[in-house]
Image (spheres, rainbow, N blue to C red):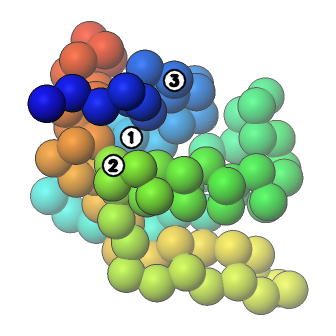
């Protein structure tokens, strides 16, 4: 059975970068912060960073242990890992990892 909506087909450059970074770190977990994925798309916008990571998580492509935010350190996702679905998305799009 195929889904009518495939989030893999609409991944942004930043989402692909996050998946690729986590795929390279796999099987270890990583702490994700806005500095890690600063790009023209997200810039230094912490809200955009949170949206990108949360969207990937909502679509089952990554998972994380905890989300921390504070005025001094900014938002961070602790123990973030790529899932089998995230790996499959990278492979289906022929993205080098």
**Along the line of sight, which residue is nearer the eye, 69 or 28?**
69
- Would you say residue 35 is visible in this rendering? no
Q: Classify residue 48 as left or right of residue 76.
A: right
Q: Earlier in the sequence, mark 1 or mark 2?
A: 1
**Of pointers 2 and 3, the one earlier in the residue sequence:** 3
- Quadrant, the N terminus: top left
Q: Which residue is mark 2?
A: 61
Instruction: Give the residue displayed 59% in from the left and 34% down from the top.
Output: 14
Asked which quadrant contains residue 7, the reply is: top left
Left or right: 58 in relation to 26: right
* Element type where label 1 sits in the image: helix
Q: Residue at x 52, y 37 (%)?
A: 15
Residue 39 in picture, x, y percent from top left:
72, 34
> Label 3: which residue?
10
Label 1 – label 2 distance at C-alpha = 8 Å
Look at mark 1 in the image and give the residue it sits on.
19
Query: x%, y% of residue 18?
Result: 47, 42
Labels 1 and 2 touching (C-beta < 8 A):
yes
In the structure shown, which secondary structural element does the residue marked by tag 2 occupy? loop
């Amino acid at each position: 059975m195929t889904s009518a909506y495939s989030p893999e087909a609409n991944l942004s450059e930043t989402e692909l970068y996050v998946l690729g970074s986590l795929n390279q770190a796999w099987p270890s977990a990583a702490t994700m912060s806005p500095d890690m994925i600063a790009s023209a798309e997200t810039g230094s916008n912490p809200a955009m960073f949170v949206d990108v990571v949360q969207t990937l998580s909502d679509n089952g492509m990554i998972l994380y242990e905890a989300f921390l935010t504070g005025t001094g350190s900014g938002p961070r996702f602790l123990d973030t890992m790529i899932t089998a679905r995230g790996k499959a998305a990278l492979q289906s799009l022929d993205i080098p990892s």
